[in-house]
Amino acid sequence: MDVVNMDGVDVNTSVQVKSFFDSAPALKDATGISNKLTQFIDKNSSLSGSEGPRRVVCVTSGGTTVPLEQRCVRYIDNFSSGHRGATSTEYFLKAGYSVIFLYRRGTCQPYCRSLPDDPLLECFELTNDSSIQVHEPYSEAVKIAISGHHEAVSGGFLLKLPFTTIFEYLQILRLIATSMKNLGPNAMFYSAAAVSDFYVPWESMAIHKIQSASGPLDLRLAQVPKMLLVLRKEWAPTAFCVSFKLETDKEILLEKAGNALKRYKMHAVVANELMTRKEVVILVTDSGQVSVHRENDNSDVESPLIKQLVEKHSSYIKEINT
Ligand code: PAZ
């Protein structure tokens, strides 16, 4: 039998969470991040949208790394490109949300999807008088990227916060969640990041580069505590919470997504398969499962997905407020 705290988190998870944060290396510039968050939330909570107070969504994006050494030379990583998070951010902004974009450094950024991998070198060229001009095939993409990004950032609707390691990610997520608490049901979490399931606790991690001369490497990885439950129950109990479930085996995907919905008390779980994740996702809620497809090869599956989530969020806000 699970012993459960007042807030619905089992005691075992609470102990693991406490030990994770107590032993994690201190977050660099925690005060700077908190100040940015306070400013962003204060500004946005005083604004109104078409259906009441402006909504704020925290979109998490990209994969967390697991360092193997404190002075890190090697780390465990995962495949996530950040495309889902970046694309979804654009659609949330379009739907009138403000977005806190918690992203892995170096991954895909909102409005930059149509740019080449090395935009500086490929989009721009030097003219004969040594000034810089946009290389013709990219001029439209560059205009869209600059104007979309500028409008969102200078309007104060997009706050971008980078992370690399699992330690940074979870510490920043906790700061975000606690600063969004006052937004009540107008807050949403859209957890598209691929978060490591296992990690090396800081205190048992080698300090210096692990030496190959010591022979084969035995690593013992601890389980990352189930933070989704803590997010939902402790950090942001009134927010609308959406998580993602990725599997490579279709047979177990829906079962795992259904379990996540119940176990972490999510309002919706987006189930996707690795190979088809850009074409189709399945939205799993208490009311059942709905397949969401992109309209054609040139469109984004995030467009209909965000539309459906915005509708579900509206119903949730109405329900809470009545
Ligand atoms: O970042 P990306 O666009 O390459 O992939 C998106 C994704 C598959 C990481 C995301 O849709 C997702 O399922 N995130 C959660 C993964 C998980 O921990 O199960």
Image (cartoon, grey):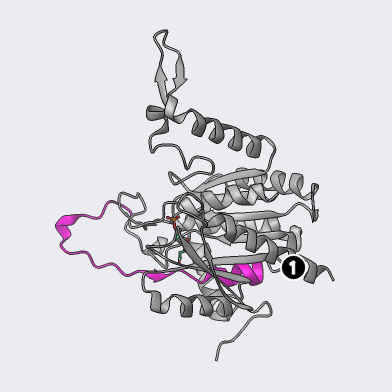
The verdict on residue 283 being magenta is: no
Q: Which residue is at a point 27% across and 51% down the rendered structure image?
A: 209
Placement of 78 over or under 154, stated as above or below: below
Residue at the outermost right position? 322
- The part of the chain drawn in magenta is 207-235
Instruction: Locate residue 133, reporting x and y percent.
Output: 46, 19
| Left or right position of 71 against 29 | left
Residue at the outermost top position? 129
Q: Quadrant of residue 251?
A: bottom left
Q: Which residue is at a point 75% across and 62% down the rendered structure image?
A: 184
Q: Quadrant of residue 285?
A: bottom right
Placement of 138 over or under 3, stated as above or below: above
Placement of 46 over or under 224, stated as above or below: above
In the picture, the quarter occupied by the C terminus is: bottom right
Instruction: Locate residue 136, reporting x and y percent.
Output: 44, 25
Specify the amino acid type for callout 1: Ser
Q: Residues within 10 Å of mark 1 (few under 14, many from 20)?
A: few
In the picture, the quarter occupied by the N terminus is: bottom right
Q: Quadrant of ligand 1?
A: bottom left
Which of these two is toward me, 29 or 153?
A: 153
Instruction: Locate residue 78, reporting x and y percent.
Output: 37, 58
The residue that mark 1 highlights is: 315
Which of these two is toward me, 225 or 28?
A: 225
Q: Judge: label 1 CB < 8 Å from ligand 1.
A: no
| Left or right position of 72 against 210 | right
Instruction: Locate residue 289, reporting x and y percent.
Output: 56, 75
Give the total number of marks visible in the rendering: 1
